[in-house]
Image: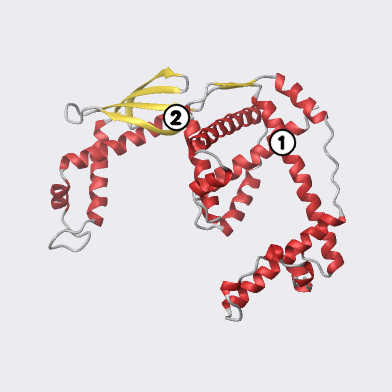
């Protein structure tokens, strides 16, 4: 049975809606009882063990009005969720719910303001424009022996750093005399051995190691070229999109990118202020650039989703679940629904970009 009796939806602005509902007040007592029982299980009162105080005393301690308000909020949230699910509304962020007077009537009036995913138009002209990009030949990938040798030198310097740190930990070296590893002459660097070949590249000997390094460098270059072409396609695609983007979507993307950046800076041992000093940029200019980049990413994602829908591009659910299980096996603490959403979006985007790269 529905949690609400009637509902009406009105558009207030692009992607902005007001929903007015009448909640079934007869359901409220069920929610009050559930909330009261839950709080009683966790409450400690003088003279009683935790969770053993009589319900009547718990209700008096908390106040019937407070319990009723909390129950009404929970009922309202679930009723609104029911309506959103029934009408397949794609809500962005958290709805702003306003409850009516809880004393005046058995039923409860509710007003909710929601933001939805905007309608987006991807003009057909995008295919012709992207075909011109795809017609340009990709840069030929070459790897020189010098590049391979430079990587080997870097690995030898890294080995010197690791050996020095191990010696300091074992008390065989003084931390105050830590050298500048970039300035150590090449003939003083430790050589890589068979153990290094196997651990770094799964190679059996030096020649095999060099061959695998060369292949890895080649793959990295090819990935960089592919990534550059993908960025060019994305920039062109944005020119063929029409959308009235709610600021809430920009806010969400900006918050996500800020959180990722803070995590990256923390791993490097840098504060945001120190990072801005390094790149010689004012905070307000940096914030403005981040917001504009977030806006572009949000529009691009909507465009990719629209193309996937229009072209019937769907990722195999079994493929998604396989990847989800793989990630959870390495990060068991992660939320499965969040991981699934991430994998779904990632694989869908990959499929769309693959489609775009083949437009002729």
**Which of the 4 image quarters holds residue 169?**
bottom right
In the structure shown, which secondary structural element does the residue marked by tag 1 occupy? helix
Tag 1 residue:
230
Q: Which residue is pictured at 58% across the width and 59% down the height? A: 330
Would you say residue 227 is visible in this rendering? yes
- For label 2, the SS is helix
Q: Nearer the viewer, residue 237 or 157?
A: 157
- Can residue 337 be seen? no
Q: Is residue 326 above or below residue 7?
A: below
Image position, residue 239 (x, y; %): 66, 23
Q: Position of residue 85 (x, y in %)?
A: 45, 32
Residue 148 location, x and y as percent?
A: 82, 58
Q: Which mark is residue 168?
A: none
Residue 86 disc label: 2
How far is the residue under mark 2 from the one under mark 1? Answer: 38 Å
Q: Is residue 195 above or below residue 250?
A: below
Q: Rate crowding at label 2 as few (under 14), some (14 to 19) or many (20 or more) other CA atoms within 10 Å.
A: few
Classify residue 310 as left or right of residue 28: right
Which quadrant of the rendered structure holds the N terminus?
Answer: top left
Name the residue nearer the viewer: 139 or 96.
139
Q: Position of residue 266 (x, y in %)?
A: 51, 54
Q: For the C terminus, give its image quadrant.
A: top right
Residue 185's place in the image compared with 121, above or below, is below
- Above or below: residue 215 compared with residue 68: below
Q: Residues within 10 Å of mark 1 (few under 14, many from 20)?
A: some
Q: How is the image coloured?
A: secondary structure
């Amino acid at each position: 049975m529905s949690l609400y009796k009637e509902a009406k939806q009105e558009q207030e602005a692009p992607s902005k809606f007001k929903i007015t509902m009448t909640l079934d007040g007869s359901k409220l007592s069920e929610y009050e009882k559930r909330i009261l029982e839950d709080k009683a299980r966790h409450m400690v009162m003088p003279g009683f063990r935790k969770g053993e105080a009589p319900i009547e005393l718990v209700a008096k301690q908390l106040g019937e009005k407070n319990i009723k308000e909390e129950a009404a909020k929970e009922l309202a949230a679930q009723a609104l969720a029911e309506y959103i699910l029934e009408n397949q509304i794609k809500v962005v962020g958290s709805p702003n719910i306003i409850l009516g007077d809880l004393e005046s009537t058995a039923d409860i009036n509710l007003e909710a303001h929601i933001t939805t995913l905007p309608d987006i138009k991807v003009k057909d002209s995008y295919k012709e424009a992207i075909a011109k990009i795809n017609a340009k030949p990709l840069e030929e990938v070459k790897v020189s022996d010098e590049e391979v040798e430079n990587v080997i030198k870097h690995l030898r310097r890294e080995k010197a750093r690791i050996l020095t740190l191990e010696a300091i930990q074992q008390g065989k070296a003084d931390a105050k005399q830590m050298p500048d590893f970039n300035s150590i002459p090449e003939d003083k660097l430790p050589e890589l051995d068979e153990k290094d070949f196997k651990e770094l590249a799964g190679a059996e000997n030096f020649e095999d190691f060099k061959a695998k390094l060369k292949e890895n460098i080649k793959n990295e270059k090819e990935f960089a070229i592919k990534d550059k072409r993908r960025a060019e396609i994305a920039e062109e695609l944005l020119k063929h999109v029409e959308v009235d983007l709610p600021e809430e979507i920009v806010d969400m993307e900006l918050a996500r990118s800020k959180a990722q950046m803070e995590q990256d800076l923390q791993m490097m041992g840098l504060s945001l202020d120190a990072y801005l000093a390094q790149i010689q940029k004012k905070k307000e200019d940096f914030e403005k650039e981040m917001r504009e980049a977030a806006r572009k990413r949000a529009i691009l994602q909507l465009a990719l989703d629209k193309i996937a829908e229009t072209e019937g591009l769907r990722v195999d659910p079994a493929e998604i679940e396989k990847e989800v299980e793989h990630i959870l096996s390495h990060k068991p603490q992660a939320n499965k629904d969040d991981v699934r959403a991430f994998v779904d979006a990632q694989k869908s985007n990959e499929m769309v970009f693959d489609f775009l790269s083949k437009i002729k």
